[in-house]
Image: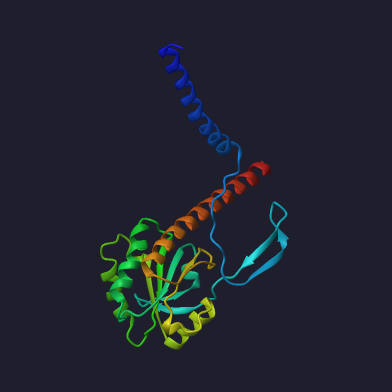
Amino acid sequence: MSKKQHIKKYAFLIGVLFLFPLSWLLFFGVFSEHKFKTLPYYGPKEVLSTTNEAGIPDTSYYQIPDFSFINHNGDVYNRDSLKGRVWLTAFYATNSPHIRKITDRLLAPNWRYRNEEDIGLLCMTLDASHDTPEVMKAYVDQAVKQNIRDDKWQFLTGQQQDINQYITDAFFIEDPEHTAQMFLIDTIGNIRGQYNGNLEEEIKAAIEDIALLKKEMDIKKYEAKKRAENIVDAAN
């Protein structure tokens, strides 16, 4: 076999080795159903009598209960105020001995999603006697001064016993005053993430989960839009 024939043979084999996996990727990309990892739902759930388009029973997932506290701007803030946004929720006081570390870590998701209007941070104080709206506003303003959207961070205060009771009831935390947990809340109040461990690692995990939840939201919006278009087309 000549040198030229050897070159053609090896070129052919390389081409086959390259095209084979590429063809499989194209096949699954075109003919398979696209799926992605979705986040779990935390808390109790209820199976409904209704079914979805595939005939699978619908499920009602736990949503955090309503509340009424005061934010760092002195405005009343409740569950309806949260709707339409994804919230990473944390509990601490602005006079915490680890406040600088907490602030630095929480700034990461706030900066990462600074241009995303529907993603924010929600904090509840664990020392309402210290954290008046004025104190919290000074803290939030200082914390987010390098960020574009300061309204993406809400810090809440009120009667401490009411806040502690709410944290216990809504997030199933027995000892709110000594909790280091964070939660990810979706746009309708479902708990979709829970983080309790090394703060830096948990923040990284939360940032990744926010991206997944954001993708889920975008897909649901697209599907809702397509359903609405199909209804209009059917009516015409």
- Provide residue 230's location: percent of width, then percent of height: 63, 44
User: Horizontal placement of 43 versus 110: left or right?
Assistant: right
User: Horizontal placement of 85 versus 112: left or right?
Assistant: right
**Image quadrant in which the C terminus is located:** top right
The correct choice, above or below, for 136 with respect to 216 in the image is below
- Provide residue 52's location: percent of width, then percent of height: 69, 55
- Provide residue 53's location: percent of width, then percent of height: 69, 52
Determine the residue positioned at 28% across, 73% down.
100
User: Horizontal placement of 119 versus 99: left or right?
Assistant: right
- Provide residue 145's location: percent of width, then percent of height: 26, 65
Which of these two is toward me, 19 or 9?
9
Number of residue marks:
0
Q: Could you say which quadrant of the image residue 106 lies in? A: bottom left
Q: Could you say which quadrant of the image residue 178 lies in? A: bottom left
Determine the residue positioned at 73% across, 54% down.
55
Determine the residue positioned at 33% across, 82% down.
131
Which of these two is toward me, 8 or 170?
8
Which of these two is toward me, 93 or 223?
93
Question: In the orientation shown, which residue stands out farthest toward the front?
Answer: 1
The correct choice, above or below, for 91 with respect to 191 in the image is below
User: Horizontal placement of 88 versus 28: left or right?
Assistant: left
**Colouring chosen for the image of the structure:** rainbow
Which of these two is toward me, 36 or 124?
36
The correct choice, above or below, for 27 with respect to 86 in the image is above
Determine the residue positioned at 66% across, 64% down.
59
